[in-house]
Image (spheres, coloured by chain):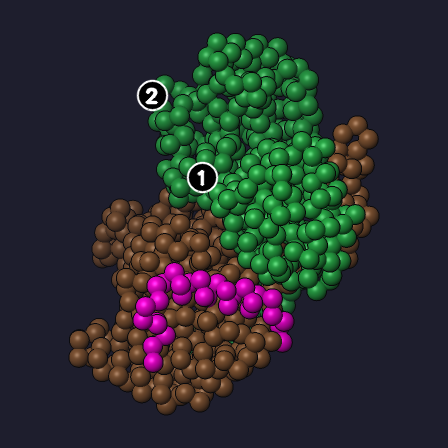
Chain colours: A brown, B green
Amino acid sequence: MTTFQVGSSLIDIAAQTRQAASKLAILSTEAKNYAIEAIALALESAKDEIIAANIADCEAASNQGIAKPLYKRLQLDEHKLRDAITGVRDVGKLDDPVGKVQIHRELDTGLILKRITCPLGVLGIIFEARPEAAIQIVSLAIKSGNGVILKGGKEAVRSCEAIVKAIKQGLSHTAVNPDAVQLLTTREETLELLKLDKYVDLIIPRGSNSFVRFVQENTRIPVLGHADGICHLYIDKAADISLAVPITVDAKAQYPAVCNAIETLLVHSSIAEEFLPKVAEALAQRHVELRGDARTLKILPHIATATEIDWKTEYSDLILSIKIVDSIEDAIAHINEYGSRHTDAIISEDSAAVETFLGLVNSANIFHNCSTRFADGFRYGFGAEVGISTQQMPPRGPVGLEGLVTYKYQMTGEGHIVATYTGANAKPFTHRDLK
Amino acid sequence: MTTFQVGSSLIDIAAQTRQAASKLAILSTEAKNYAIEAIALALESAKDEIIAANIADCEAASNQGIAKPLYKRLQLDEHKLRDAITGVRDVGKLDDPVGKVQIHRELDTGLILKRITCPLGVLGIIFEARPEAAIQIVSLAIKSGNGVILKGGKEAVRSCEAIVKAIKQGLSHTAVNPDAVQLLTTREETLELLKLDKYVDLIIPRGSNSFVRFVQENTRIPVLGHADGICHLYIDKAADISLAVPITVDAKAQYPAVCNAIETLLVHSSIAEEFLPKVAEALAQRHVELRGDARTLKILPHIATATEIDWKTEYSDLILSIKIVDSIEDAIAHINEYGSRHTDAIISEDSAAVETFLGLVNSANIFHNCSTRFADGFRYGFGAEVGISTQQMPPRGPVGLEGLVTYKYQMTGEGHIVATYTGANAKPFTHRDLK
């Protein structure tokens, strides 16, 4: 079996997906939840087949000398699969983001306007090695009423095919047309997918920075996500050092590979001599390599020198660059110049400084006296995270299911025409918000 | 005087605007309203100078043989200027879109998350002839806390320079740095502006369809607006003809040049013989030219033939194409194929048909038993309209001031670190929404 029919062009597949998605868009919450449970059951039934497919993927990857971290991400054992299926059922329990009435207003007697959330349409999701990502993505797409075209990493092709086969099998007994979920398997199709702005409403790339940047630069379809996560922690002159040290350690070393870990520590000059030796000692215990600017080196003479390149680098590793600044303005200027508009934090007991920082730093997440690592949809209580967006327009920051919906204005009248409300004897609107 | 300093590159100007905008972003509502009143007063003081500049523009345009409708839009007499200044004060009265708390949530004791609206940053607004558009745009930008780079039509350059000079003069005595408002005057600068995605957060093009499409296709900056407005009215088999006829006339003829006027009438075959002669008679009184498909011609033999091109054309004129369909599904399929996702309406007394239409038509505005001409920010009660967006992602449809803001997540803690909430003894989050 293959989910990519021979002879079908990608446009045909995308059109099919859109067609199926338009029906999915108007299903009730109950019907969508039923479909999500059917997916969970089908994945359980297909467990052996999926794991066998994954073993074949892993063997092939191993033969081609895949890097060890990638191999670990590719591996889908029974435990990971069970967790992923639990995740499907968790999505079933989330609040339905579709059908929320955002505006309900009488424009005049009998002329009623509603702004109501609705699915985006079709999502294009391009992800790298982890095959279980497909499971989570499909459940989020169904819950939000969207069709989804998946493109997994080439190493995971057998696993993804087995997963999507089971999902389609599960959906076949539900109100959701299995065409709402499609899998692409070749790199050429990825490039084609990015051109299908008539059929695909949002692209969510999950992968390396350079991959995300490639997607952003090669499509007119809106892209949800971020390339870099260059996050900063600024230690203000009014910082409580007993908070600043453990927060720095957490923000850098608790999980350095993730996007909300810090890469650069900015330290006010008037607290640097007291703070830096203490934080350096704490970071040394966590094996963090430090790189400092010239002024930092005067206080920490044994660390490496940080250059312009360091301020622009997302290490994603146990490395931290340090710069001494003479004012909060300098700290903010550095962040707005080198940051990724992702997550930046200030440690300070001075409420005026905190207000300045929260107001002037132009990032999606701006924190005070806590770790940058909290920037996350689950920690924010969104239940699921489809990605963290560093764009300026909403959705911004950690995006939950609400990032997968849009809205439409629906108005119902009783024969109302605009001519009544224009000209010399124009009738006024009432513009009365309704409950 | 010129607002474009010789020797400054556009990048320098954009950087200045961003700098000024970042200060403007955190001003209080009172300070912004004070600045808006200062603009109104300054425009009143500069009235003679502005009108003189406009007369010079009009003479030059006239000498170059400008088309009459363009000339009328270029003209800025005392009456139009007074209305524009009234509009500035109206914007002052609108609710401040900045600083709205959208989420206020305790993640754990002392760890408080807020999602709060904030300005986008810098707007790039490109508009054609009407010089008073600059006045409205600047007041909306200031109210929403954004810097603005304006580019007016070349015919209106003297008028725009006089207007922006007065605005900057007015701002010079307020908390708003006059650098927050900039005027570009050459076409080359427009092209450069579209490339400044590091400095400009949103482009709003106001002009012809082809111009908007050019902008959309030549920038990576988000664009608010729409190219086409191909709107449809569908007369269902269960339509009340006494509503259907006047709504058709209003939707086509009340103001045919605007984007929310209809271009195509879709008529269910089972009502066509009764409805079409009546609507044709009413439309004839309004001098509307009709073009029908083959089946329509059997009922209205004297009208012109509509071809594939008609379904794709925004006439913006007293012309209406008519197509007979055999089902609501066919009507919806036509709309989703040829429409602009702008505004489409159904006339029907059948609630199931209405629900199907509202659910399956993928447009920003979907109406029932009222004219498409109601799709408008003022009519919706938004107070001001920055444009109508036909994109799929929000903001969509008529966009008021809220389309000029985004949001940031601000979190404040008391030394909270993520390590506390992970691993074997992970503390749970409380995720409690606060008032």
Q: Which residues are magenta?
A: A1-30
The answer for how far apart the CA atoms under marks 1 and 2 are is 32 Å
Left or right of residue A20: residue A73: left
Left or right of residue B239: residue A168: left
Position of residue A137 measured from the top left corner of the image (x, y, whole percent): 45, 70
The numbered dot on residue B213 is: 1
Q: Is residue A146 above or below residue A392?
A: below
Q: Residue A20 colored magenta? A: yes
Closest to the observer, B100 or B184: B184
Position of residue B71 measured from the top left corner of the image (x, y, whole percent): 55, 18
- Picture quadrant of residue B81: top right
Same chain check for tags 1 and 2: yes
The reply to whether callout 1 and callout 2 are in contact (CB within 8 Å) is no
Q: Element at badge 1?
A: helix
Image point 44% across, 25% down: which residue? B184
Q: Element at badge 2?
A: loop
Can you see residue B16?
yes
Closest to the observer, B82 or A181: A181
Q: Is residue B222 above or below residue A126?
A: above
Q: Amino acid at mark 1?
A: Arg
Position of residue A434 measured from the top left corner of the image (x, y, whole percent): 77, 54
Say which label, 1 or 2, has the lower sequence index: 2
Image point 68% across, 17% down: which residue? B79
> Which residue is labeled 2 in the image?
B7
**Pointer 2 indicates a residue of which chain?**
B
- Picture quadrant of residue B187: top left
Image point 75% across, 36% down: which residue? A419
